[in-house]
Image (cartoon, rainbow, N blue to C red):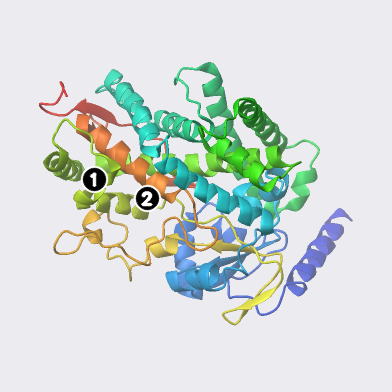
Amino acid sequence: MLAILLILLVIVLFVFNTTSKPRNLPPGPKPVYPLIGNLPAVAGKDVLLTFREMRKKYGDIYSLYFGHQLMIVVNGYETIKNVLVKHGALFSERPHNFLSDEMCQGRGLIFSTGKVWKEHRRFSTLAFQELGFGKLSFEEAINTEVVKVLEFLEEKQECPVDIKECIFASITNIMLKIIMGKSYNYDDTSFNEFLKKMVETSQLVGNASILVNCFPFLRYCPFDPLKKNVAIENRDKITSFFKDTYKEHCQTYNREYIRDFVDLYIREMEKIAEEGNSEEMLTAVIGDLFGAGGETSTTAVCWAFIYLVRHPEIQARIREEVDSTVGPTKIPSYSERHKMPFLEATILEVLRLGDVVPLAIPHGVPNSVVFDGYTIPKDSSILINLDSISHDPSLFDNPTQFKPERFLDSSGTVIHVTEFIPFSIGRRRCIGSAVARMELFIFITAVLSKFELLPPEGQPPPDPVGVLGITNMPRPFQLRAMFRRNSSES
């Protein structure tokens, strides 16, 4: 009897699954299985490689079902530009899912929409511009933290180290200084607890959001197997820290002396006389800046160090260029970057081959639309595949090879490839892209001014393999820092 019921259930699910789909969808893999959709086509595989193969088969726009969730995957510069720029107003929404609805509650820079999103996006962009050129410069904050990284490497000199935690602490401190006017020693207990909660929450949210989006019934499971309640609890603790900082700033705020991002927010709220949800919205914005911005910059710097360890000849060439520009004992300022085209090209190649953010946070549409001859249903998630650009052989010859020279012309001048958009384009483009580039420049020049980066003794260089989440974070790796020849006293 049980077997008959199971067979009937499968038949019902199959009929429902195959008859309730919208018509005229973009092409995609078959079959679409009951409950799980196209998950077998990607489960246990390299998602980015799989998407590249699907693009070859189905074109620049194709559809997939992850469980019940319909995903529209958009590939190639021209198609992505059409979606995000030409038709940006149609595709600037966010789909409803666990991450946007339960974790972020529709607030912040990433998951808010409409007028609220526009206002906070405008404010945040202008605030970063003001802070960058005002009393507290980004470069100043970055340089302060890079000194701590150099001290860490000097202390561990020639010993194998996992530098990721140090980089993450450094990047987080930079953001704390810019946003809240705070900074911590790396051995501070409360700071390390904050870092731990940030990392744990990112991992839990990544796991829970994927599964809950595919199988919505899991959010109602009484035993919380995905630990989504732990993620929400962590979010509340992190938010509490942000709220305490906001209250401190409200008590000490002086509009004649703006200290940081929070002060600028208070000033903005005074201008528009907004009441009620100022604190909630600010903490959500700050959470997005830390959650997305911190992980993006950490990922980029980690990839830079991996490729430098794998290519000592590139380390040597960067040193030679920096030494000839500012001398062997000085760290160049960011304003001098244009005098070092090979270094600029290396940073571009790190962003390209490192695939720092290969898949943009999904977009959505407020209503069903027709795009490129296909129906894009209201409840679908539009996945912008930036990897389809960074690994496009029609744009980049031998795209899996690390080759900074591809961004230089015959005279050694940096080539700005219009199609290369590592931080996306359009209304939802990453507002922290300039900061990430500055951090890459300063971290690379500071570390290489003092050290040679090597693999652990007797071991091969780290493999350039990423783990796909919010970013394409490198797998755990170790390196060894050794004082530059003839520069141990510098």
Viewer-closest of 332 and 127: 127
Which part of the image, by quadrant, shows the C terminus? top left
Task: Name the element at disc 2.
Answer: loop
Residue plotted at (25% across, 28% down): 481
Q: Residues within 10 Å of mark 2 (few under 14, many from 20)?
A: many
Q: Residues within 10 Å of mark 1 (few under 14, many from 20)?
A: few
Viewer-closest of 173 and 217: 173
Query: Mark 1 touching mark 2, by CB under 8 A?
Result: no
Residue where numbered disc 1 is placed? 336
Mark number displayed over residue 356: none
Viewer-closest of 72 and 20: 72
- Tell me residue 423's x, y (percent): 45, 55
Mark number displayed over residue 354: 2
Residue type pointed to by label 1:
Glu
- Tell me residue 39's x, y (percent): 61, 58
Q: Name the residue at the front extreme.
A: 256
Task: Name the element at disc 1.
Answer: helix
Residue 77 as seen in the image, left or right of residue 258: left
Residue 339 as seen in the image, left or right of residue 472: left
Residue type pointed to by label 2:
Gly
Query: Residue 376, relative to residue 373: is it above or below?
Result: above
Residue plotted at (67% across, 53% down): 116
Residue 70 as seen in the image, left or right of residue 219: left
Q: CA distance from mark 1 to mark 2?
A: 25 Å
Q: Earlier in the sequence, mark 1 or mark 2?
A: 1
For the image shown, how many numbered marks are present on the structure?
2
Task: Please tell me in which quadrant of the rendered image residue 163 appears.
Answer: top left
Task: Please tell me in which quadrant of the rendered image residue 396 appears.
Answer: bottom left
Q: Name the residue at the bottom extreme.
A: 373
Query: Residue 22, relative to residue 113: is it above or below?
Result: below
